[in-house]
Amino acid sequence: MEKIFLKSDLGKSFEDYEFSGLKNSLKMEQTQVIDKIKDSVLKGRGGAGFPAGIKWETAYHVEDDIKFVVCNADEGEPGTFKDRFLMENLPYKVIEGIVICGYAIGSKYGYIYIRGEYTQAIKIIRKTIQKMYERNILGNNILGTDFSFDIKLVRGAGAYVCGDETSLINSIEGERGMSRIKPPLPVFEGLYGKPTVVNNVETLSAAAEIMKYDYNPYLQLGTEKSKGTKLVSISGDVYKPGVYEVEFGKMTVKEIVNELAGGVKGSGLGFVIPGGISTEVLTENEWDVPYTYEDLFKIGTNIGSGGMIVVSKDRNYLEIIKNVSDFFRDETCGTCFPCREGNKNINKMVSEIYERGYPMKKEIEIISDIKNAVSLAARCGFGEASVNLILSILENFYAKKVK
Amino acid sequence: MKVKINNKEYEFQEELSILDAVKKAHIIIPTLCYSEKLKPFGSCRLCSVEIKGERTLKPACVTKISNGMEIYTHSEKVRKVRSTIMELIIASHGISCNLNCLTCSKSASCEIKVIAEEIGIMEVRVPPISSRVPEDRSSYSIVREPQKCIVCDRCVRKCAEVQSVNILTIANRGPDTYVTTFLDKGMGNVDCVNCGQCVIECPTGALHEVYQTDQVWNVISDNSKYVIVQTAPAVRVAIAEEFGAEPGRIVTKQLVTGLRLLGFDKVFDTNFSADLTIMEEASEFLERFKNGGKLPLFTSCSPGWIKFIEHNYPEFLDNLSTCKSPQQMFGAIAKTYYADKIGIPREDMIVVSIMPCTAKKYERVRPEMKGDVDYVLTTRELAKMFKLAGIDLLNLPSEEYDEPLGITTGAAAIFGATGGVMEAALRTAYEVITGKTLERLDFESVRGIEGIKEAVIEIDGLKLNVAVVNGLGNARKMLDMIKNGEKDYHFIEFMACPGGCIGGGGQPIPTTKEILSKRMKAIYEIDKSFEIRKSHENPAIQALYKEFLGEPLSEKSHELLHTTYIARS
Ligand SMILES: Cc1cc2nc3c(=O)[nH]c(=O)nc-3n(C[C@H](O)[C@H](O)[C@H](O)COP(=O)(O)O)c2cc1C
Ligand code: SF4
Ligand code: SF4
Ligand code: SF4
Ligand code: SF4
Ligand code: FES
């Protein structure tokens, strides 16, 4: 069953929304807010899963008169649309989360970087920001306190890599959308060289939701290592695609697909891509796994962005591989050799495999070596994860059969 | 700080990059996008190393060491990743089919070949994929062959960080990522100053000079032409490197012999016209100084610098000395004074220059130069010709330059290093102003490899503020300081290339800091070896004025030895 937590204010109009999360936060010390988020073990929902509280705490401790909060709403991962859902349906909660983060870390300036194609979300967020200024939930002396905060909306440049936090920072600065060398991490030197917290839309919304309660609701949700709930956007061969909220550990992937998304269309399950096209697939033998960070990790895949794509047996898997490879070949920023050249070469091989109708053992071996090099030595997360899905399909469905 | 490298303990005082630390432990890690003079970029990933406790490998060039770090530079994991990356690089480079190392401009200095050996690559399993970006032959100085480009960004960074010219850029993303010029216009159609610093930075054959060796072979064998050659001061201290010698080896006299063997009718020296430049330029300076002319006076012998100021600081054009560069002065004198002297029709005389420089190829075709120089070869091109002719340069017997355009002084020799023009000019200016003999010839304060040097020179109670600048990034700094009124000088020497001509874009590759200082040392040795070390004491120059020019800045001098500039912004 869907667990309604983050979605609990769904349907509320802006006028009825109380911003209790923000109001509560402003009554607390900054460090108390940070501690609450830390205690909740809210992990970053953008894909990397880094604990938000620790990021905020680090930013709080970096001394600088200017700090930034950047909300990552680039959502470029194919099959992921939960951030759009949040921005279109709970825009005030998204912005509220940004303001709370700003208060906690001692920042006066926020940015929300929204994927360019999301025209509807951009419109809604723009309007929400404006109304929040009118209600003094943004601007100077928010709700009569000493805290002031301004937000700027930035429309994304249309490249998937810009979703990577360092590329996104470059893009906001008007530079080429290409990753920066880490270290320094953005919390130390981010936007315009200043300490910057970059968080995903869902992460910030969840933070706002957590702050709404006097107690810590996350402590009662999920498992030991995966606290709270997660928005899962399900698409592909299912009867009821959509964005569903799942409490960690309470459902398996199979149950999510069958009970929430209405089951697999066609003649049965081929595989599930659990968290966007950077994650390894789950086959029929594996999909009865509890939906938690730790359980998916144990069997070699990842929650990722929560973009679940269901693929039925009837599909041509090689065509899927080819499309995924086209995507990675075209979207790399082109800076580092393993990712640029690796994805180019894989694409060439995959195109041949697709034409031929089956892969050769040698090709799988080379692709596996390239994946090894890219995932160990690429310059950013894009390259690191770029071959996961392709190789996992080849290994699961072809490796044993071919010569 | 204690660090373990391949299970051995080391202690370091500073927070070095892993790459620098490992170097101190005498371990070699392959690098391709790294360059000692540039900001690290972290794109080739060949330098990746394993660090205990880290999931992914870390690039040694951008990762700093920390206390207790355990680094594995050549573990099996590391070797496997490097080898795969190398395979990909080789594939992108399309070597097996359409590119051929044997015909490549960088066959001798190619870094890819060296690294392939360091990594021990035995097989390339992925098919070659070449870029379809067309060649850029729009420039008089430099050719770009993008199908050999591996997009390491070194040329881009060199042009931007060191030269502050910003001609090259990485465009696009994905498989279409490539290096290009503004709007793909081509290097000949943008503000490129032709300095060739990008060429010596490029690890592959994607950038090289515009070759003129074929044309030179042709004229040498054409009996109806009288072909003379001039050699720039920086060539003789560098060309030996192309034959495997230690940097800093001086081969002046072997060079002369080699050129004769190639078939040049006369072998002359650009140092002759360097002395001539001093006569004109020192006189120009003194005239401006006495008559309240435009100061500071900027030197004008570096054509890369000239094009830079024409594009970027046209408001300073009046500060430039009107003297042509020594290369062009040589051509002008050879085709008038010398041609008449030996009775050769001017149109039958061909002047070839051997230069450390790619910008001289462009200078040659400037309309103001009236075609006085016919062909310009770089140090590297001449080395290729020697090799092609089977000339074993290092072991040739010594021969002397021809007279009279081969008679030179120590003052001219030092033109090849940053500070040399200034020092040579000061030696002459001192004696002209005071009428006394200069006792100490060495002006140490203007020597050395630093980008900007300043000195106050006292001449008979007169205080001259001078500065010496090399590298265009430093030139930009200097001009901005003058513009903002922060600095005030009488005389400034500018050279486009870091270190001066010894670091020119046509010199042997590699040109590192260490190699530069060795070439520089050799230059000053040559100066010391001359009995005559002041330009105005050069007897051939004295004769030239007596027989032909009259005196410095005469009408004839102006017609032949001086030029004009164009505001290009
Ligand atoms: C290629 C690439 C694309 C990414 N795209 C997104 C994205 O669209 N949205 C997002 O929130 N994070 C994205 N990330 C992750 C961000 O770099 C960053 O980790 C995240 O925004 C941090 O927020 P979180 O901790 O709240 O998840 C991407 C990372 C990479 C490497
Ligand atoms: S891994 Fe890919 S996307 Fe990331 S820096 Fe390298 S080329 Fe760019
Ligand atoms: S740059 Fe030239 S020599 Fe080097 S690998 Fe390429 S083709 Fe061969
Ligand atoms: S020749 Fe000089 S100015 Fe031109 S692109 Fe190369 S480095 Fe830049
Ligand atoms: S032209 Fe040479 S230096 Fe420039 S990016 Fe290509 S390979 Fe590197
Ligand atoms: S030398 Fe370190 S990444 Fe290229």
Image (cartoon, coloured by chain):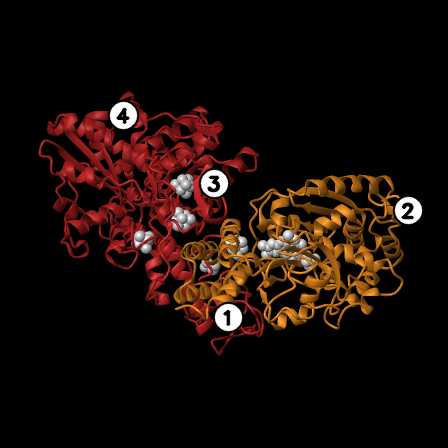
Label 3 marks a residue whose chain is: B
* Label 4 CB sits under 8 Å from any ligand 4 atom: no
Q: Chain of mark 1?
A: B
Image position of B355 with respect to A309: above or below: above
When asked about the image quadrant of residue A1, the answer is bottom right
Chain B display color: red
Q: Amino acid at mark 1?
A: Glu
Of the numbered discs 4 and 1, the one sitting upstream in the chain is 1
Q: CA distance from mark 3 to mark 2?
A: 50 Å
Between marks 3 and 2 in the image, the one whose residue lies nearer the viewer: 2
Q: Same chain for the residues at labels 4 and 2, yes or no?
A: no
Residue occupied by mark 1 = B50
Question: What is the three-letter code of the residue carrying label 3?
Answer: Asn
Q: Determine the secondary structure under disc 3.
A: loop
Q: CA distance from mark 3 to mark 1?
A: 35 Å
Instruction: Check residue B166 in the rendering and tell me which mark sits there, or answer none.
Output: 3
Compare residues B254 and B293 and report the one nearer the observer.
B254
Q: Are marks 3 and 2 on the same chain?
A: no
Judge the density around disc 2: few (<14), some (14-19), many (≥20) Cα neighbours within 10 Å.
Answer: few
Residue under pointer 4: B370
